[in-house]
Amino acid sequence: MRFILICVLILLVFSFVVYVMKAIARLSNHLRGAIKDVKEIREQKGGRPVASAEMAPCAQCGAFISARDAVTVSSRGGSRVFCSSDCARAHIAR
Ligand SMILES: [Zn+2]
């Protein structure tokens, strides 16, 4: 009789341990997902200032253009950025 009781007890403890392990595995999966989300958000947030730093408004029409495509004209007042040579010419003629 006592032997059967011990067997049942061990089974109960074992199933409880398995249940806890499963719960921990599920939790760690959730945590991993959350950490991934936070990392993605951080990368997005970190990427934006860099992108905006590369963008400059055209001094003539105000359109935002990337620094690579911008036409930069140096003058007494410093360098001005234009979206196109047409805008640069229009600004100088003004
Ligand atoms: Zn322009």
Image: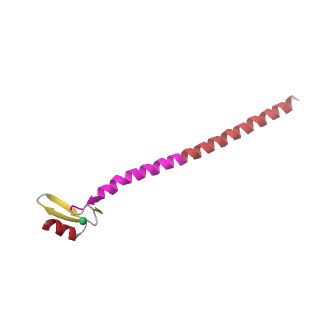
Residue 24 image point, x, y percent: 62, 41
Residue 80 image point, x, y percent: 19, 61
Residue 92 image point, x, y percent: 14, 66
User: Which range of residues does the magenta coloring cover?
Assistant: 33-59
Which residue occupies 30% across, 58% down? 54
Residue farthest right in this picture: 1
Q: Nearer the viewer, residue 39 or 7?
A: 39
Residue farthest left in this picture: 76
User: Image quarter for residue 18?
Assistant: top right
The quadrant in which the C terminus is found is: bottom left
Residue farthest bottom in this picture: 86
From the viewer's perspective, tell me whether residue 91 is left or right of residue 26. Answer: left
Asked if residue 84 is positioned above or below residue 37 in the image, the reply reads below
From the viewer's perspective, tell me whether residue 23 is left or right of residue 40. Answer: right
The colour scheme applied to this rendered structure is secondary structure
From the viewer's perspective, tell me whether residue 93 is left or right of residue 39. Answer: left
**Does the stretch in magenta take in 77?**
no
Task: Label the magenta part by its dominant secondary structure.
Answer: helix
Which residue occupies 17% across, 60% down? 79
Which residue occupies 36% across, 54% down? 48
The quadrant in which the N terminus is found is: top right
Tell me which image quadrant ligand 1 sits in. Answer: bottom left
Q: Exactly how many numbered labels are in the figure?
A: 0
Asked if residue 12 is positioned above or below residue 33 in the image, the reply reads above
Q: Nearer the viewer, residue 29 or 6?
A: 29
Q: Nearer the viewer, residue 85 or 46?
A: 85
Residue 52 image point, x, y percent: 32, 56
Which residue occupies 74% across, 38% down? 14
Residue farthest top in this picture: 2
**Does the stretch in magenta take in 42?**
yes
